[in-house]
Image (tube, rainbow, N blue to C red):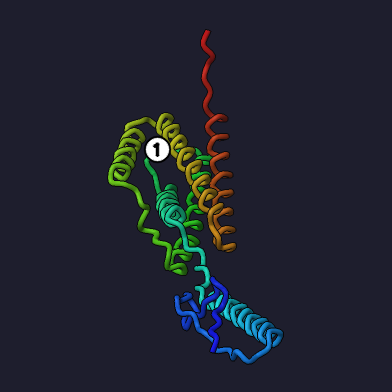
Amino acid sequence: MTRWALPPGLRFSHSPYALTMHTPVFEVSRKLPEFGLRKLRLGLFGTLLVWLFCGCSLLHKSSREDAPSPPSPAMSSANHHGYALLFDLVGDEKDISKLHFIKHERPELKNLLQEIARASGDAYTKLEKIGKAAPGINLKDPGLPAAEIQTRKDISKFKEKAILSQSDKELEIQLLLSQNEALTYGAHLAGAVARSETDPRRQQTLQQISATLLALQKKVFEMFTKNYSWSEAK
């Protein structure tokens, strides 16, 4: 009997994930004529190629089916903390109209503060609903380091002292400057969070809050430049 082995590099494997070193050997009779032997070799070789091709195709298909689907985009920490910072800001701004320490408060200033309070209260309610509906949003976690939190507290106390220590005119100036700063920050913060928000409805809400705060900031600045002037240096 004559033993015939497969060409080098072609090996069977019982596992679909790896080829082994075991090479099967086929028994071929010496009595077969050379033409029949050549035909048998070609037939076996063709059958082997078909098996290998089908096995690779099935393995590739199985790999695609078993591969886990890509996870849905999670909320980034930047968005998460951005919501908390914005929520804290409008929470303070919604109570601005409750300040009654200006003895001679002008009607236009009073109306503007009430408008800021209403808009901030509306934004506060919308953000609160978002926080309740989206488990990934924690409105109580601004993600700030301890030094930043303490710095913000110190600035708040400084501004409070500066405002309360002034007379009516200077107090009004300090109040407008403070509002200009808060509204500018809030408008751009809401815009930044909106740009990275993947939910269309939340994105639209943030864009509306940003536009509203920016419009109020312009009113504050116009009131400041309209009512206060300074003489040019000679």
Q: Nearer the viewer, residue 131 or 233?
A: 131
User: x%, y% of residue 67?
Assistant: 51, 73
Q: Quadrant of the N terminus?
A: bottom right
Is residue 69 at all visible to an observer of this figure? yes
Look at the picture and state if 214 lies above or below 209.
above
User: x%, y% of residue 72?
Assistant: 51, 67
- For the image shown, how many numbered marks are present on the structure? 1
Circle 1 packing at 10 Å, graded few (<14), some (14-19), many (20+), is few
Q: Nearer the viewer, residue 33 or 181?
A: 33
Question: Left or right: where does residue 208 sit relative to residue 76?
Answer: right
- Secondary structure beneath dot 1 equals loop
The residue sitting at 32% across, 32% down in the picture is 165
Query: What residue sits right under mark 1 in the picture?
Result: 103
The residue sitting at 47% across, 83% down in the picture is 14
Is residue 111 at all visible to an observer of this figure? no
Task: Name the outermost residue toward the top.
Answer: 234
Q: Nearer the viewer, residue 105 or 10?
A: 10
The amino acid on which the numbered mark 1 sits, given as a three-letter code, is: Lys
Q: Nearer the viewer, residue 125 or 206?
A: 206
**Residue 169, quarter of picture:** top left
Question: Left or right: where does residue 41 sit relative to residue 228?
Answer: right
Look at the picture and state if 73 lies above or below 112.
below
Look at the picture and state if 62 lies above or below 200.
below
User: x%, y% of residue 145?
Assistant: 31, 46
User: x%, y% of residue 83?
Assistant: 45, 55
The residue sitting at 44% across, 64% down in the picture is 131
The residue sitting at 31% across, 40% down in the picture is 151
